[in-house]
Amino acid sequence: MSLTQKQILLVQHSFSQVEPIAEQAADIFYGALFEIDPSLKPLFRSNIKMQGRKLMSMLKAAVDGLNDLDSLVPVLQQLAERHNGYGTKKSHFTPVGNALLYTLKTGLGEAYTEEVRQAWITVIHLVADTMKPEITA
């Protein structure tokens, strides 16, 4: 799945609109994630506010890295290796992606267009396709 320059710009611009409400966005994300799949809640053993800051920081790094996929891929592979230790499974990627889309829809409001949604779906698939081979469960 390839990512166009226009999709990169859409994702980067939309993320810059959500970034000022990062803490609220993280709360929305985890609320949605645990509603979509309550079985994931025990995987998050640390403080959820701190986890939210890590999530938003990693999202920012991924979004910023979209212009240099050769540098982003090893970062995502290392992230996946760490997630193995947390009990992450390949089946978790779908609820995480859906929770992220819900968070963006909520955070962006009218700016969440179908074109923005499709650009994010492409990025989510790119990230999942990069990380899944490193996930052992």
Image: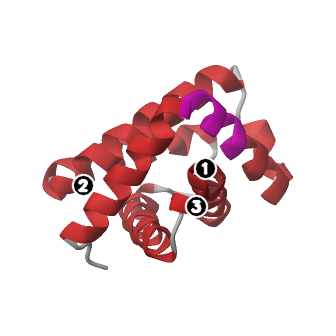
Residue type at mark 1? Thr
- Which of the two discs, 3 and 2, labels the residue nearer the N terminus? 2
Which residue is label 3 attached to?
110
Closer-to-camera residue (51/7): 7
User: Does residue 128 belong to the magenta stretch?
Assistant: no
Which of pointers 3 and 1 indicates the residue nearer the eye? 3
Residue 24 shown in magenta: yes
Which quarter of the image is occupied by the C terminus? Answer: bottom right
Q: Real-space Cα distance between discs 1 and 2?
A: 24 Å
Indicate the quadrant where residue 9 lies: bottom left
Crowding at label 2, few (<14), some or many (≥20) Cα neighbours within 10 Å? many
Secondary structure type for disc 3 = helix
Q: Is label 3 in contact with label 2 (beta carbons under 8 Å)?
A: no
- Give the image location of residue 119, x and y in percent: 40, 70
Which is closer to the viewer, label 3 or label 2? Answer: 3
Q: Name the residue under label 1.
A: 88
Q: Tag 2 or tag 1, which sits nearer the N-term?
A: 2
Quarter of the image for residue 134 reads bottom left
Decide which of 54, 16 is in the foreground and name it.
16
Task: Classify residue 91 as left or right of residue 70.
Answer: right
User: At which x and y percent is residue 74?
Assistant: 24, 48
Instruction: Assign the N terminus to one quadrant of the image.
Output: bottom left
Q: In the rendered image, which residue does mark 2 sit on?
A: 66
SS type, badge 2: helix
Q: In this view, does 121 lie above or below 80?
A: below
Separation (CA) of disc 3 from disc 1: 33 Å
Residue occupying image coordinates x 41% and y 58%: 131
Numbered range of the magenta stretch? 21-29
Number of marks drawn: 3
Mark 1 falls on what kind of element? loop
| Residue drawn at (24%, 69%) of the image | 6
Residue ID at (80%, 59%): 36
